[in-house]
Image (cartoon, rainbow, N blue to C red):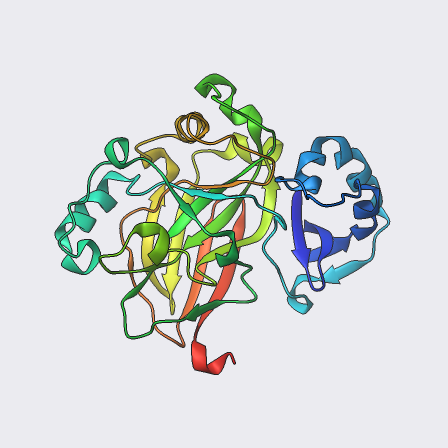
Amino acid sequence: MRLCRFNDDRLGVVIEDHVFDVSDILDTLPQYRYPLPRFDPFIARLDELTPQIHARARNAKALPLSNIQILFPVANSGKIIAAPVNYQKHLIEARADPGIHHAIQIAEIQKVGLFLKATSSLVGPSHGVILRHPERRNDHEIELAVVIGKKADRASETEALNLVAGYCIGLDMTMRGSEERSLRKSLDTFTVLGPWMVTADEFAKHLPAQLTLRVNGEVRQSASTADLIMSIPQLIAYASKFYTLFPGDILLTGTPEGVGPVHAGDVLIASIGHIGSMTVEVRAEENCK
């Protein structure tokens, strides 16, 4: 099943080139008072709600995908966990390119661990990327994004995939420089997630998946998740050693080689096998006020 958020926070099931509006299912979610939960209430109940979603989609109004605004698919992520240099060829290119490493020693993921991105950086593909600092080098990084579906603390690798709600395409946009990763990767609009979430039961059987990113039609990045240094189960288990994982948390699994700069006016098309593609426009900040 492919689930998307669209327009004014509507919930839809994507089938081919149409979206079937099942937003009324959200009325069944628990109502919370302050303090609000640290998890996404819809993702937390996804397994329970799946039969009802299928039933309502059969009678829902079909909307053409071309006529809607696609938002990021998880409304209330508590945190975004990201894996640096998790492809060997990207590690090699990062060490070789001064525009990437800025005289900072780039170490293996096993040494540097993971890092966090601000949830305020999340946008959907229809919103696009805004360059807050166009005078700096700003790079694209396509990644497979994992949506956590169950609370987990110190999970094992064997149980890790059972904790996943679904998978999305992620763009981990990066401003290059000498500052900490979390600062340079947490700018507004610098985490593009979409175009929808493919549920784990449908996507997992299609792993490993092929990732491709094109900029203005030119292929910049192309690789398979089979090339990950730390696998998805390893990443989930490793992350849960440091953070309790909650439903709706996002895990960005790393980008392959081929990262490069983008500029205002560029059009990015990010694709991952069995998820689909999302088109993302890059804009200058002054054009967005």
Looking at the image, which residue sits at the far front? Answer: 34
x, y percent for residue 252: 43, 43
Let me know if residue 16 appears in the view. Answer: no
Q: Residue at x 46, y 28 (%)?
A: 240
In the displayed structure image, the side of residue 12 where residue 181 appears, left or right? left
Looking at the image, which residue sits at the far right? Answer: 59
Camera-side residue: 245 or 222? 245
Q: Residue at x 83, y 50 (%)?
A: 24
Q: Residue at x 41, y 43 (%)?
A: 210
In the displayed structure image, the side of residue 26 where residue 172 appears, left or right? left
x, y percent for residue 23: 79, 52
- Relative to 152, residue 61 above or below: below
x, y percent for residue 279: 50, 63
Camera-side residue: 150 or 66? 150
Location of the N terminus by quadrant is top right
- Relative to 232, residue 139 above or below: below
Examine the image and state in which quarter residue 123 appears: bottom right
In the displayed structure image, the side of residue 25 where residue 1 appears, left or right? left
Camera-side residue: 157 or 115? 115
Let me know if residue 132 appears in the view. Answer: yes
- How many numbered callouts? 0
Examine the image and state in which quarter residue 17 appears: bottom right
Examine the image and state in which quarter residue 9 appears: bottom right
x, y percent for residue 157: 44, 20
In the displayed structure image, the side of residue 158 where residue 221 appears, left or right? left
